[in-house]
Every structure is written in structure tokens, then in C-alpha cells.
Image (cartoon, grey):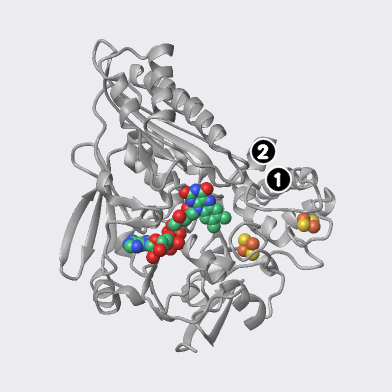
Amino acid sequence: MSELVKVQVTVNGTRYEHTVEPRMLLVDFIRHELGLTGTHVGCEHGVCGTCTILLDGKPVRSCLLFAPQANGHEIRTIEGLGTMDNLHPIQEAFREAHGLQCGFCTPGVIMSVLPFVEQNANPTEEEVREALDGNLCRCTGYQNIVQAVQLASEMVASRKAEAR
Amino acid sequence: MKPAPFDYYAPASVDEALDILSEKGYDIKVLAGGQSLVPSMNFRLAQPPALLDLNNIPDLAYIKPAPDGGVVIGAMTRDSDVEHNPMVAERFPVILQAMPFIAHPQIRNRGTFGGAIAHADPAGHLPAVTLALNARYHIRSKNGDRWVGCDEFFLGPFTTAMEPDELLVEVEIPALPARTGTSYHQMARQAGAQALVGVAAVVTLDPGERVAAARIALLSVGETPVLAGRAAASLAGKLLTPETIEAAAEAAATVDTDPGGDIHCSPEYRRHLIRVLVAKSLEEAGERARGKRG
Ligand SMILES: Cc1cc2nc3c(=O)[nH]c(=O)nc-3n(C[C@H](O)[C@H](O)[C@H](O)COP(=O)(O)OP(=O)(O)OC[C@H]3O[C@@H](n4cnc5c(N)ncnc54)[C@H](O)[C@@H]3O)c2cc1C
Ligand code: FES
Ligand code: FES
């Protein structure tokens, strides 16, 4: 075993400090050390997208980072969005538009498109499909995911307008 | 699977990194964006005893103008930062044209410009694009530094002119002459999948619209990115017409390369793609050169 290293991270606004082996993948750190099992793990080589999280606000694959690389950084996972009683608009849109079936791919899809949805009020289908090109879904055939993302963009934009 | 154990070093400066490299040599691997190295460690295809993580060295991430109209890109600059940089867009639109083909946005948020070049994947987009642009790579070790031109850098699949104690620190792309146009085209089975063939073309025309210089670089057609020298030479002093373009594409597919096949692509199909993509890239680069766009 190699020397253990200390990892200090802020995840969804909460600070954590754990000591781990350097080879621990960030996705395993999030799931097993922090108990946040909303982030899923599939292929472990960057292809499927289900492990996507926000690292300092940007979507990245958490299966392609080692836990110590997150030291001092800020992470957002699916648990950091809405609650059961108060869904985030993107979660509401996925429910409304039936953007999921088994739900395995969904956390990764949502974290991948979250910045996109916040920046694009009225994206075309083509733009949405491009934003989704790094996430595989074996159930839906993508059609409803595309519609859910379009709906989410509208909902986020209209909430912003209301808040003004 | 999970990676084998390794010792982890994450220095905060280039000097410190070079000290560690000179001490460990073959027993340590540089970790840049990790988008190629970590998958191979997860599969235990690679089991380095130690990793040298460059991600805590902010000094290696920058995009600077070179005085003559070129640009210098620090090795640890993320692909997505290059993709969204206005100066790169203006001076070297061909880099922008190629960027979206590199995997997916989430991977470009992490993968680095220098990492892609050091990795020297014969199917990689950036080795070929920088080869077409006649780039130079700045390499440092504890004992000094040197510049290696793109024509001498790529030695074989995943093999470069760098020694184990050397670090790629930056990439310099020289300014394009006036009346130069560029273009990038590729074919893959699906968005983000490895290119079956890719072509980067840089064409400079003289005032009479004859070809003054051309560089055509191909990927996924051999052991390294390949410069199609005969194809380029066949165009020298000629107008870009459907006939001269077709002759150049034919030379690229038959003289400059001898592509192999794999389960995704027979050698014949690969030759076909070379012809089509070289022709398309030359045509577009020529049009842009006439419009004096980069
Ligand atoms: C699912 C997926 C699909 C992909 N598809 C494509 C594709 O279609 N086309 C494509 O071009 N790329 C593709 N990539 C690869 C991606 O672009 C990588 O980012 C890139 O190849 C390597 O860059 P990196 O910064 O991640 O390097 P790393 O993975 O960190 O390193 C790669 C290698 O280079 C060495 N190295 C890195 N930086 C330096 C340095 N500064 N000095 C010395 N040595 C160094 C490392 O030791 C290692 O051996 C894909 C990646 C994934 C995960
Ligand atoms: S588990 Fe990370 S991309 Fe598939
Ligand atoms: S909903 Fe089942 S994989 Fe996407």
C-alpha cells in the first residue's frame, strides 16, 4: 500500500476531510467515503458519463480523477440540487417530460447539462443533442431527455425572470 | 477495475517537478488531464509505481500571444480553455474546428493541450493539428531546456522524442503567412469516438492564387501523425482546381500513406476516407485563403 494522503473538499457546501490511498478514484471517494451514492459509476474509462460531477463549476468525469486531486476544490453532485419537497427546476423538468426510465444515467446527465441549462434560455434540439453527446442512456432513446433539457432551460430562464 | 497502488507527488512549481522527475526517471509517470492515463490505469494496462501530478502548477496553464502573430500555449491549458479563447479563434481557427471532435465537453474540461501532444496517440487530433501548423514543443529537464520541431517529435505510437526526465512545458505555434487558409475534417463512427481518419490542411496562396506552400497532416493512418509531403508538393505553383485537388488527394492516399485496417475500418475504406477528406480540407482551406481568412 502506498502512503495515505489527506483530502479536504467542499461537497454541496459541506466541508469534509478524509485520509485515503492516492489511487482511490474520486467517484469512489464520493460514494464510499462520503456516502453520496447519487453519483453513479459505470464504465470507469470516461465513456458513459454517469459519474459526471461539477468540479469548481465545470462538468468532469469523477472516474478519471483521483480523490487527492480534489483537495482544496469545490464539488457539486446531484444531492446538491433540489430536495424531495422542493425539486430544482431541472429535476422538475425531467419528471414532467419523462426524461428518465431506470434513472441510472440521470445524475450524470443532469450534472452534465446543468451549466448549459443555466446559460441557454432557448436552445435548439441540435444544441441540446450536442450538449448531451457525452452521456449514454440505455433506456430512453434520448428523445425525452432532449425534451426535458429544453423544458429545463425554459423553466430556469423563467424563474430567473420572476426573481428579477 | 481499480488502479494499482502508486505514490503520489503533487508539486507546486515546475522546478520541483523537474527535481522529482530527474530523481525517479522511468519509475514515475506525469499526470496531466488524466483523460488518457487514468483510463489505462483503471484497466491496469498502465501500473506506474508513482505519479507526478502537474495540476497544482498554475504556471503551466496560459495562452500568450507570440510577438509575430503566433501563440504560445502552456502544457497544462485545458482543451476547453483553448476552445473558447478568442485569440486562438482569430489566429488559428483550425484548432477550434478540430476541438469539438476531442471526446466530449466533460473530457475537454479536464484534458490538456500539452497532455494530448505528449501522449502522441496516432489517432489524436492535436498532434496532427499542431503538425500541420508547424508547431515547436518546448521541453525542460533539470539539466536545461530545448525546443523540438513537430517534424522530429513524434517517433511512433505513444512515443516521442522526450526523455523520461523531461517535461513538455509549452507549445509554440508560429504565425500564418498572409493569404493562408486552414481546414480540419474527420470521420468517426459516432460523436466523440476515435477518428477513423482526420485531416488538417494549411494552404498559402501567392497573389496569383497559386499554391505557395501547403502542409497536410493526417491522423489514424499510421504509427504517428503523418505529413502528406508528396500531396503537398504536387500542388506547388498550381491553382487549386478540382483536378489538382484530386491528384493531391490521390497522392495522400497512395504515396504518402499505406493505411492498415481494424475492426472498424478496412484499409480500402481508410484510403477512400483519406481521398475524400483531403480533397474537402484542401478545397475549404483554399477558399479561406482566397478570402484571406485564417
Ligand atoms: C472517452 C474518451 C474519448 C477520447 N477520445 C479522443 C479522441 O477521439 N481524440 C483525441 O485526440 N483524444 C481523445 N481522448 C483523449 C483526451 O483528449 C486526452 O485528454 C488526451 O489524449 C491526453 O491529455 P491529458 O491531459 O488528459 O493527458 P494524460 O492522460 O494526463 O497524459 C497522457 C500521457 O502523456 C504524458 N504527459 C502528459 N502531460 C505531459 C507533459 N506536460 N510532459 C510530459 N509528459 C506528459 C503522461 O505521462 C501520459 O503518458 C479521449 C479521452 C476519453 C476519456
Ligand atoms: S463511469 Fe465515469 S464515464 Fe463511465
Ligand atoms: S434512464 Fe436508464 S440508462 Fe438512462
> Looking at the figure, which quarter contains the N terminus of chain B?
bottom right
Which residue occupies 55% across, 79% down? A24
Q: CA distance from mark 2 to mark 1?
A: 11 Å
Mark 2 burial class by Cα count in 10 Å: few <14, some 14-19, many 20+: some
Residue underneath mark 2: A122
Q: Is residue B84 visible?
A: no
Which residue occupies 37% across, 76% down? B10
- Disc 2 sits on a residue from what chain? A
- Which amino acid does the dot numbered 1 rest on? Ser
What is the count of numbered marks?
A: 2
> Looking at the figure, which quarter contains the C terminus of chain B?
top left
Residue underneath mark 1: A158
Mark 1 burial class by Cα count in 10 Å: few <14, some 14-19, many 20+: few
Residue B288 position within the rendered picture, expressed as x and y whole percent measured from the top left: 38, 22
Residue A70 position within the rendered picture, expressed as x and y whole percent measured from the top left: 50, 73
Taking the image as shown, residue B51 lies to the left or right of residue A145, namely: left
Q: Nearer the viewer, mark 2 or mark 1?
A: 2
Q: Residue furthest left?
A: B144
Which residue occupies 42% across, 55% down? B78
Taking the image as shown, residue B240 lies to the left or right of residue A75, namely: left
Between A2 and B84, the residue placed more toward the observer is A2
Q: Is residue B256 visible?
A: yes
Between B113 and B272, the residue placed more toward the observer is B272
Which of the marked residues, 2 or 1, is nearer the chain's N terminus? 2
- Which amino acid does the dot numbered 2 rest on? Asn
Figure quadrant, ligand 2 = bottom right
Q: Secondary structure at mark 1?
A: helix
Between B44 and B100, the residue placed more toward the observer is B44
Q: Secondary structure at mark 2?
A: loop
